[in-house]
Image (cartoon, grey):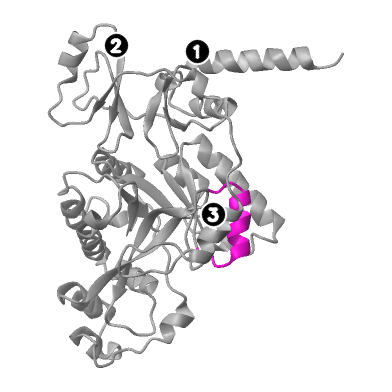
Amino acid sequence: MVVDNPAELRERPPGGKNASPVAKVKASTLSWEERIDRALSAPDGLAMVYQPIADINRGVVAGYEALARFSDVGEETPDQWFRSAVDATLVAKLDARVAKLALEHRSALAPGRFVTINAEPSSFGSKELDKVLLGCPSLDGVVIEITEHQKIGDHRQVLQCLGRYKDRGALIALDDTGAGYAGLSQILKLRPSILKLDRELVAGIDHDEARAALVEMIRVFANRIDAKVLAEGVETQSEATALRRLDIPLAQGYFFGRPAAGFGGLESRAITTCARFPSPARRSQLDKLVELTACLQHSPDLDYEIFFRTQPELERIVVLDSRHRPCGVVVRGSRQPDPLRAILTVNRFESISEVARRMLTRDESERFAPVVCVNGSGRYLGTISAARIFSELADGYQSSQHATPR
């Protein structure tokens, strides 16, 4: 979760001629519970702003983080409001309100971009948040970000709730990796799609070799579990440049863009910085291994059994969303109520050895199943069998042995 600079927030006046009725009530006369109740009940008690998230490699906007702003402006940061909501047991209502406002604006998102919505672990499974998230026919393009204000209690319950959100198309992000409760065991249990680096790891990364080594280690680990790293709190050009050199794919912070009422673009200085460090011309090792496998666009009414009966040569079907991105695979003979299985998605520019390592992190039952290959935009290209991956590795090893001087 990214919050504004506390010093900057303190400079903001608590009211003014355009202040809402909520802001005109002196905070000192109300408890936190009363202030939060007012923010939830007043039409203008809560508003959303959006901070751009940059694709560092391409110098474009990849998505936005939805951030809450309270009209009852005082000394407190938004972060303090949510911490107080946890203490007042009102955080589920507050998270639900934020999610509802963010989803109302989702139609204005450009194709291919996502929006992240923050929520506390205790809010998952609450009737308030479930009503908002599960009430949507689709959560494609939505990232549910697990915030760090409280420790996750019952992981099983949280995983069940997150599974329901993912079934609607949502991705999961874990906030403040490297700080707070976002430890390695937490990552292994939750298996998020995005790991957000804490600002404490990013600050000074341009001149601190230890920080750079730790961030690189997290990036390698993220690749192995099929996740992306997002560095937050990037404030300087030198920090952005250091992250680019470490091959961190996503970043946000004042250097790239400040929170705004709409879905804005990146700062021109950020675009220029990304352009100075273009991705090196890469030759894809995977292209020659890709096989075009049957695919279908996802539909809740699709009868996969009928499709398999008419296509006896097929053993599996890759299922795509409306943007031609893979969202799962269906295997012949599946008896599950929901036959759509999770998939391992690899980018065509990943190395063969990296793909093999990632395959070995999967559950044993799926470890040697084909992987799905996508392009830089996440669009489906085809599948690669385990046999072709390991055969190519063996050929490469044999060639290296022959090339070694005796």
* Residue depicted at x 52% and y 38%: 223
- Mark pair 3, 1: CA separation: 36 Å
- Mark pair 2, 3: CA separation: 44 Å
Q: Quadrant of the C terminus?
A: top right
The residue pinned by badge 2 equals 314
Instruction: Give the mark, 2 or 1, whose residue is nearer the N terminus.
Output: 2
Q: Which residues are magenta?
A: 233-248
Amino acid tagged 2: Leu
> Label 3 near label 2: C-beta < 8 Å?
no
* Quarter of image, res 290: top left
Q: Magenta stretch containing residue 172, yes or no?
A: no
Instruction: Give the mark, 3 or 1, whose residue is nearer the N terminus.
Output: 3
Secondary structure of the residue carrying tag 2 is loop
* Residue depicted at x 12% and y 28%: 301
Other-residue count near label 1 (Cα within 10 Å), few / some / many at <14 / 14–19 / ≥20: few
Question: What number is the disc on residue 387?
Answer: 1
> x, y (%) of residue 277?
61, 51
- Of all residues, the one furthest to the right in this rendering is 406
